[in-house]
Amino acid sequence: MEFFGYLLAIIIGFFLGIFGGGGSLLAVPVFAYIFTLDEKAATAYSLFTVGVGSLIGAIKQQKNIDFRIAIIFGIPSIIGVWIIRFFIVPTLPDTIFKIDDFILTRRMLMFGVFSLMLFFSAFSMIYDSNKNIEPKKINNLYSLIILEGLIVGGLTGLVGAGGGFLIIPALVIFIGLDIKKAIATSLLIISLKSTFGFLFGDMLVMNIDWEFLLSFTFLTILGILLGSYVGIYIKKSNLKKWFGIFILTVAIFVFIKEFINN
């Protein structure tokens, strides 16, 4: 199973290389169900993988990054991730609450929210919802951007996923960025908040298996390089739709695994 898990690391990177995002959504299920890590470790290791993968994507698209907006959105996102990873996740009890025969555990909460994020991410891929967003800068909504930064950062901290499907529409609708700049800027934001959350949250409260994590991340980077090369020669729209369907399948699997089977 470990060999299969490392193979999936390359596949995760491959889709990151092609689409510039999305592939990292598979990191949490791979860590949790293939390498059998608990929910804290799976989401923490995913944060590191997401951070590195998004940074490579941001470097590739650096000409389209709006660094000022990345700072405005990124700082509250970093704060949101850090609060969740440093204060909330380490103190969450194994059992959140119990009503009659239903028990909501910490794992069910974290992976339940994660499955919802997978579902909405899959929807945005299948219907390519970002392409229909029209830039229309709305004045005096920077406070909303800061608020969304905190919320998205909190979600990232809880589930270990980047949340690009939430960031990109906000940058286009509220700030008025065109879609290319929004995608590139979102990659930098995701990289910053994921990396800071891991370095200043998880590293301070848990033991990290660096040999395993760096090996997994190295294979992910190889996949990114491969995907970046292959992506030049293929039509991405149809592939993205099928990848979205696959992500939707994973979302259903995670939900059934954590809620129905339990």
Image: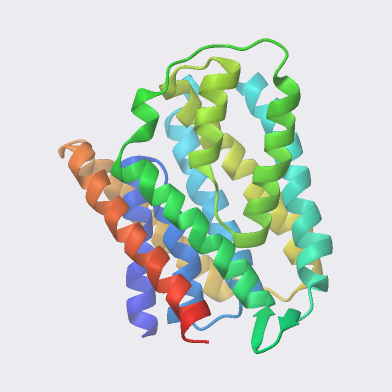
* Residue 45 seen: no
Given residues 149 and 103, the one toward you in this image is 103
Instruction: Name the residue at 69% across, 37% down.
Output: 149
**Taking 209 as reference, is 140 left or right?**
right
Question: What colour scheme does the image use?
Answer: rainbow
Q: Is residue 113 above or below residue 175?
A: below
Task: Give the x, y percent position of residue 146.
Answer: 73, 30
Task: Give the x, y percent position of residue 88.
Answer: 80, 64
Q: Is residue 202 above or below residue 139?
A: below
Instruction: Name the residue at 54% across, 14% down.
Output: 176
Given residues 204 and 251, the one toward you in this image is 251
Give the image quarter of residue 231: top left
Task: Give the x, y percent position of residue 43.
Answer: 60, 66
**Taking 132 as reference, is 190 left or right?**
right
In this view, the residue farthest toward the bottom is 101
- Report how many numbered discs are placed on residues in the image: 0
The N terminus, quarter of image: bottom left
**Taking 226 as reference, is 168 left or right?**
right
* Residue 97 seen: yes
Q: Is residue 75 above or below residue 214?
A: above
Instruction: Name the residue at 37% across, 59% down.
Output: 12
Instruction: Name the residue at 53% across, 21% down.
Output: 173
**Taking 248 as reference, is 208 left or right?**
right
Given residues 126 and 199, the one toward you in this image is 126
Task: Give the x, y percent position of residue 6.
Answer: 38, 73
